[in-house]
Image (cartoon, rainbow, N blue to C red):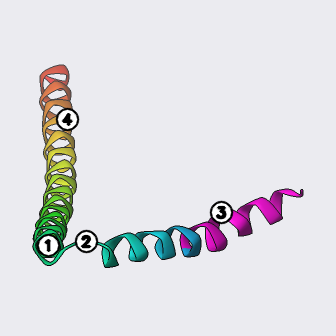
Amino acid sequence: MSWMMMVILFAFVCPMIFRGMGRSQYDRLSRVDRERFDALESELDYRLEELERLDARVGELESRLDFAERLLARGSEETLSNVESQ
């Protein structure tokens, strides 16, 4: 089997198969189990959104830290050049 066929198989066919299996298992759950499953799923969605927000915040903090490091490095270079010129 070629490389492209493997990519197509895993990218498109496998999710359809597993989605169908998951849905039939969900349909077999009792009402209480479905409610619990839905609550867990919504909690998971909330946690994933929170994780994405924190990831964006960490990225912003990294860029601010890089900026501060560049300012400090430029300031120390200017101080050194002032000391050397005297």
Magenta region, main secondary structure: helix
Give the spatial CA distance, label 4 vs label 1.
46 Å
Q: Which residues are magenta?
A: 1-15
Checking the image for residue 42, the label placed there is 1
Which residue is denoted by mark 3 in the rendering?
10
The answer to whether the residues at label 3 and label 1 have Cβ atoms under 8 Å apart is no
Tell me residue 19's x, y (percent). Answer: 47, 73
Q: Looking at the picture, which amino acid does disc 3 mark?
A: Phe
The numbered mark, 4 or 1, whose residue comes first in the sequence reads 1
The numbered mark, 3 or 1, whose residue comes first in the sequence reads 3
Which residue is denoted by mark 2 in the rendering?
29
Label 2: few (<14), some (14–19) or many (≥20) C-alpha neighbours in 10 Å: few
Question: For residue 78: magenta?
Answer: no
Checking the image for residue 73, the label placed there is 4
Label 3: few (<14), some (14–19) or many (≥20) C-alpha neighbours in 10 Å: few
Tell me residue 82's x, y (percent). Answer: 14, 29
